[in-house]
Image (spheres, rainbow, N blue to C red):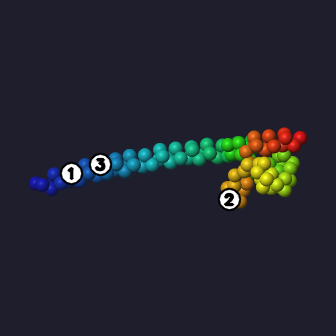
Amino acid sequence: MQAPHLHLITEKLVVFISLFKFSIMKYIEEKLDYLVKKVDELQKGISKSEKIPVTGFNGFITQADAVKKYHVSKDWFWRRRNTGQLPFKKLGSKVYYAEKDLFNLLEDFS
């Protein structure tokens, strides 16, 4: 007599597990859709930023970019750094200058 009772419990358990698997799969699908949308937004942002010239990070510019932008030699930058006329930040092998400092210094020389 207990066999039919176990059979009902087993059927309900199977239904519960299948619903649980469905809800987990639905949750994963929603999260993946969200991530795909975010990746698309990032890719669009990157492609847009490649088209728009960026002067630097928070007002800073690399020495290489400053050489091109202001038509001043690397030696000019090196002399100004070593004499303390031009504050700089170094991150790894790259040297960064605040554009406002560069602009002010270049104005003084013109």
Residue 32: x and y in percent read 50, 48
**Which three-letter amino acid code belongs to the residue tagged 1?**
Ile
How far is the residue under mark 1 from the one under mark 3?
10 Å
Residue most extreme to the left: 1
Amino acid bearing label 2: Gly
Q: Amino acid at mark 3?
A: Phe
Q: Return the mark for residue 16.
A: 3
Residue 91 image offset from top left, x and y in percent: 67, 55
Give the number of the mark in front: 2 or 1: 2
Q: Is residue 26 left or right of residue 66?
A: left
- In three-dimensional space, the C-alpha distance between marks 2 and 1, rounded to whole angstroms, equals 65 Å
Mark 2 crowdedness (10 Å alpha carbons): few <14, some 14-19, many ≥20:
few
In this picture, residue 86 sits left or right of residue 2? right
The reply to whether discs 1 and 3 touch (Cβ–Cβ < 8 Å) is no
Comes first in the chain, label 1 or label 3: 1
Residue 110: x and y, percent? 89, 41
The residue positioned 39% from the left and 49% from the top of the image is 24
Q: Which residue position is annotated with label 1?
A: 9
Distance of label 2 from label 3 (alpha carbons): 56 Å
Q: Quadrant of residue 51?
A: top right
Q: Which residue is at a point 77% across and 48% down the rendered structure image?
A: 86
